[in-house]
Image: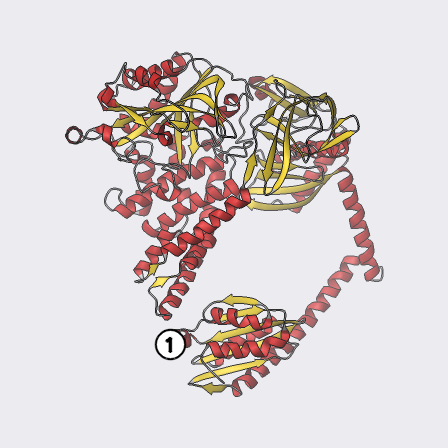
């Protein structure tokens, strides 16, 4: 059996046992603040498990694409070093929501592995929760007895809380679990060492393939456990590990899941997998990370410097540096492997096919960018190593190694590799200390403490905000939250007109009123299928009846901007082509932002056409047509446009303005005429193949027109009400350019004269030519820098130059060293200027040969110059 057949066999087996097969959710998570990525099969069912949503079926199964870059056995820097852990992987799973429990879950698992797939039961081991005295939990004897129907006692192993008690988080549903492990060692090894002794010991051939979680408790904020009203079965089986087992391989990377990619890597890099350990590790890293990055981009997550985008960028850069260091790839490489990945997985995951062009362009641009950074980082590391040797040391400072990691993406092992080739070590303890400080800073910045929910009523929230902005309501539950030392409350209502932030539209603000008491709602969030109203205070009587009122003025502006994004989407397709796809949006009361796929800059003429189309449709006053709870098939027939990376249910809401038809749950103007007018204020690139348009509507567009009219009026007055304002401005610019050239010519002459004077006045101290002085006040910082380099050209050897300047009342210190002084005396301009800058109440730094520092105290320049000479050991 090959991978694609195994995946289908799993789905067919559980379908035959009454399970509904559901599609994989996107790997990127949109509305759960506790997770950035789907890291387990249960993530898409979290709302159901928490009781916030009703399942489409009480029995479901799927193959879910997942991403793990931290946690048990999944540290990113370890992936590729072994043969069975991954960043992106597929998880096969089956679930029961209040239907069957332990007995049927165990029978189904055994039946699939042994009866359906034919695995040797003698090679299987199962673990059960051993209990916890601290928790007051006994051993899971029920699961052990059920497994005893199929396995001898020697194959049923007790597991501790870490391995065999599953928890969703610090609070929430949890319960014991049973892991199924397989021993793939040769019979000769099995005869010598009992497989039971190797379970959960990180043996590469005795691995877990399936985990059956029996959710039967709820963990409260105080740490106590209470029984769940509805017990849940949640299982997860590592697809890649299952394929490895069935294909009789000893490594996940030897299966047909990875081999086509590995062969392509070898073909393109001229390497052979299986001959050299470093090449093998690099090949596995590239093969694994290619999948993670490609699937993330397909699901709408572009590499960036923040949150989920940073994780994807980090994964991609790790692959690039392994290819660079061990596969000899000095140019973009990963994107060339993409067609092979699409060929192998495109049938099971059609989003790869649909997004192939975008994925390829984003990958290539990210690779090119990082390769440039890598080159810069290596140059800086060379400087650090030269500085280390000049100081007579053999160990590179850990803090400097960490700076290379933090700024240039140089992980410790790459720095160690380059340093070892130069005969140097790296202070690993110092590096780890800096890493720990960063983690503590990040943890402190992100720390949030949520109390237990106080339940006042049972029930679900009914959203009425599409039709009204006021509603009578009661509080279902509330809790206190502390975030960054600021406290506020989260409130869930039984009926709400407040739109919760979702689909790019920001959450509503407003008030909850009871009698004379008003509690301000400062935001509304959508989390885990709940509309959560944020307030700074709790009502005096939370059990009372309230009037919930939305800030209507802000809502109407948001509605206009949201409807405008739909018209913008349609207009861009008309002007630029049907390849345009929405890649993200932000709708606020003040402006809108729309990200879309397009592979070149949008011209001013194209943007003007887009504006004209939208404003024409606004003047048409096209009425809103809204379809609620429309079956997905009917919505597709209507031509509704779906957003990539979003998961839709069987029934959807469709918003239609004429020919604009989109899936959307947001709030909209009742007709396009209420948008008023539409105006683009900015267009830019935010990533390879992704453009961004920012625009305003209604009053904001009107006010912008007034502001421009006033600016033009003021400019006309400045140019004596010239009839040809543009001509007058161009003439002034031309005259200014001529004057600037005259000034630059004068400055060059002045610098040349200063250079000659300073060189002639240079003093020789202990064999070093010392050039020093405080320059006249009209010498700019740029001129001072130019002067230092000119002096360096005149005195290329045994020269130290230290100059002080004052520009606009602020002092600047400039230090230049000839390269022979750096080597012979161990001097470093950056270190010297940093210490000397204290005299001018400032700071700075730079390279070993050239550095500058700014400050606040011009009177300290003479002292600063003297300090530089003192640090150089030259008393002139």
Q: How many marks overall?
A: 1
Q: Is residue 708 above or below residue 478?
A: below
Horizontal placement of 298 versus 458: left or right? left
Task: Locate residue 6, reporting x and y percent.
Answer: 33, 23
Image quadrant of residue 540?
Answer: top right
Q: Is residue 559 above or below residue 363?
A: above
Task: Locate residue 642, reporting x and y percent.
Answer: 57, 28
Residue 52 visible in the displayed image? yes
Task: Locate residue 380, reporting x and y percent.
Answer: 43, 61
Horizontal placement of 18 versus 195: left or right? right
Q: In the picture, which quadrant includes the N terminus?
A: top left
For the residue pair 635 and 166, the one nearer the viewer reads as 166
User: Who's the residue at 50% across and 25% down the image?
Assistant: 46
Can you identify the residue that label 1 sits on? 824
For the residue pair 183 and 728, the one nearer the viewer reads as 183
User: Who's the residue at 33% across and 25% down the image?
Assistant: 130
User: Who's the residue at 54% across and 42% down the image?
Assistant: 446
């Amino acid at each position: 059996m090959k991978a694609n057949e195994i995946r289908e066999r799993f789905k067919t087996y559980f379908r035959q046992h009454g399970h509904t097969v559901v599609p994989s959710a996107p790997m990127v998570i949109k509305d759960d603040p506790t997770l950035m990525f789907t890291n387990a099969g249960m993530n898409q069912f979290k709302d159901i498990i928490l009781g916030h949503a009703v399942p489409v079926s009480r029995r479901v199964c799927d193959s879910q694409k997942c991403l793990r870059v931290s946690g048990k056995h999944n540290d990113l820097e370890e992936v590729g070093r072994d043969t069975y852990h991954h960043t992106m992987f597929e998880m096969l799973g089956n679930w029961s929501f209040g239907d069957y429990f332990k007995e049927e879950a165990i029978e189904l698992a055994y039946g699939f592995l042994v009866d359906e797939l034919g695995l040797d039961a003698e090679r299987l081991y199962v673990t059960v929760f051993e209990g916890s005295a601290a928790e007051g939990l006994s051993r899971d004897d029920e699961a052990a007895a059920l497994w005893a129907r199929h396995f001898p006692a020697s194959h049923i192993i007790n597991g501790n809380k870490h391995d065999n008690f599953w928890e969703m988080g610090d609070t929430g549903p949890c319960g014991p679990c049973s892991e199924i492990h397989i021993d793939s060692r040769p019979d000769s090894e099995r005869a010598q060492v009992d497989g039971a002794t190797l379970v959960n010991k990180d043996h590469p051939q005795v691995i877990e393939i399936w985990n059956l979680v029996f959710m039967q408790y709820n963990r409260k904020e105080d740490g106590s456990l209470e029984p769940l009203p509805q017990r849940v079965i949640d299982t997860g089986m590592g697809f890649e590990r299952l394929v490895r087992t069935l294909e009789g391989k000893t490594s996940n990377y030897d299966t047909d899941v990875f081999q086509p990619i590995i062969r392509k890597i070898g073909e393109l890099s001229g390497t052979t997998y299986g001959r050299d350990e470093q090449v093998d590790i690099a090949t596995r890293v590239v093969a694994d990370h290619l999948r993670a990055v490609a699937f993330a981009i397909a699901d709408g997550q572009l590499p960036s410097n923040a949150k989920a985008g940073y994780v994807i960028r980090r994964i991609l850069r790790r692959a690039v540096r392994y290819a660079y260091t061990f596969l000899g790839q000095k140019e973009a490489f990963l994107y060339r492997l993409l067609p092979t990945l699409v060929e192998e997985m495109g049938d099971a995951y059609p989003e790869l096919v649909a997004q192939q062009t975008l994925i390829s362009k984003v990958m290539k641009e990210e690779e090119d960018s990082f390769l440039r950074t890598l080159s810069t980082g290596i140059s800086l590391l060379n400087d650090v190593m030269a500085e280390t040797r000049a100081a007579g040391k053999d160990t590179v400072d850990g803090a400097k190694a960490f700076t290379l990691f933090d700024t240039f993406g140089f992980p410790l092992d790459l720095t160690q590799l380059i340093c070892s080739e130069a005969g140097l070590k790296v202070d690993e303890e110092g590096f780890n200390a800096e890493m720990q400080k960063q983690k503590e800073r990040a943890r402190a910045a992100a720390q949030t403490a949520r109390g237990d929910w106080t339940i006042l009523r049972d029930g679900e929230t009914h959203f009425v905000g599409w039709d009204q902005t006021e509603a009578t309501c009661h509080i279902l539950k509330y809790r206190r939250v502390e975030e960054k030392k600021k406290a506020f409350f989260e409130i869930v209502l039984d009926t709400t007109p407040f739109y919760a932030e979702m689909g790019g539209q920001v959450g509503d603000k407003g008030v909850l009123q009871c009698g004379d008491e008003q509690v301000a709602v400062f935001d509304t969030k959508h989390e885990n299928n709940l509309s959560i109203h944020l307030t700074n205070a709790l009502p005096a009587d939370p059990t009372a009846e309230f009037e919930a009122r939305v800030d209507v003025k802000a809502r109407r502006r948001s509605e206009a901007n949201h409807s405008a994004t739909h018209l913008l989407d349609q207009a861009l397709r008309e002007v630029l082509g049907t390849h345009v796809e929405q890649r993200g949006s932000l709708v606020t009361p003040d402006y809108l932002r729309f990200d879309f796929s397009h592979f070149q800059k949008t011209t001013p003429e194209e943007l003007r056409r887009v504006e004209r189309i939208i404003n024409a449709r606004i003047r048409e006053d096209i009425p809103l047509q809204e379809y609620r709870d429309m079956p997905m098939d009917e919505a597709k027939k209507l031509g509704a446009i779906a957003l990539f990376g979003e998961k839709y249910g069987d029934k959807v809401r469709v918003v239609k303005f004429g020919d604009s038809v989109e899936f959307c749950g947001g709030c909209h103007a009742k007709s396009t005429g209420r948008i008023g007018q539409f105006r683009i204020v900015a267009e830019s690139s935010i990533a390879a193949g992704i453009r961004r348009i920012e625009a305003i509507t209604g009053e904001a567009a009107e006010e912008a027109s007034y502001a421009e009219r006033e600016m033009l009026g003021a400019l006309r007055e400045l140019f004596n009400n010239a009839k040809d304002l543009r001509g007058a401005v161009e003439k002034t610019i031309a005259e200014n350019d001529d004057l600037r050239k005259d000034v630059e010519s004068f400055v060059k002459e002045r610098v040349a004269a200063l250079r000659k004077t300073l060189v002639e006045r240079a003093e020789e101290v202990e064999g070093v030519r010392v050039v020093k002085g405080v320059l006249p006040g009209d010498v700019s910082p740029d001129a001072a820098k130019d002067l230092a380099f000119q002096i360096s050209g005149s005195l290329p050897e045994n020269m130290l130059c230290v100059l002080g300047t004052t520009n606009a009342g602020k002092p600047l210190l400039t230090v230049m060293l000839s390269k022979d002084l750096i080597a012979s005396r161990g001097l470093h301009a950056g270190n010297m200027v940093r210490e000397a800058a204290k005299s001018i109440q400032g700071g700075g730094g730079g390279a070993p040969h050239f550095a500058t520092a700014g400050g606040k105290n011009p009177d300290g320049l003479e002292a600063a110059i003297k300090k530089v000479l003192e640090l150089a050991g030259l008393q002139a």
